[in-house]
Amino acid sequence: MSTTVTKPVTKATSSHAKREDIQNPELEADSIVGKTMRMVEALKKYPRPAK
């Protein structure tokens, strides 16, 4: 029983440590926003075919 409890805890702490490794969170967010905007522009260029 104790092993099932400790597994998610260690996973959460390790992912939290990885998140803290990012030195520029704003830069990371900007890159995500940039990717999304490029995807939106690409979708505008190629509209869905009418059914």
Image (tube, rainbow, N blue to C red):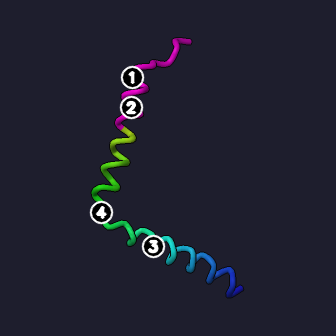
Q: Are marks 1 and 4 in contact (CB under 8 Å)?
A: no
Which mark is drawn over residue 44? 1
Q: Position of residue 17 (x, y in %)?
A: 44, 75
Q: Position of residue 4 (x, y in %)?
A: 68, 80
Q: Nearer the viewer, mark 2 or mark 4?
A: 4
- Which of the two labelled residues, at mark 1 and mark 4, occupies the earlier sequence position? 4
Residue holding disc 4: 24
For residue 46, side relative to residue 26 (left or right): right
In this rendering, the answer to whether 30 lies above or below 42 is below
Residue sitting at 37 percent across and 48 percent down? 32
Q: CA distance from mark 1 to mark 3?
A: 36 Å
> For the residue carrying disc 1, how many other residues have a C-alpha within 10 Å: few (<14), some (14-19), or many (20+)?
few
- Label 2 amino acid? Val
Residue sitting at 38 percent across and 31 percent down? 40
For residue 37, side relative to residue 4 (left or right): left
12 or 26: which is nearer to us?
26
Q: Are marks 1 and 2 in contact (CB under 8 Å)?
A: yes
Which secondary structure, mark 1?
A: helix
Residue 16 lies within the magenta run: no
Which secondary structure, mark 3?
A: helix
- Which of the two labelled residues, at mark 4 and mark 3, occupies the earlier sequence position? 3
- Label 3 amino acid? His
Residue holding disc 2: 40
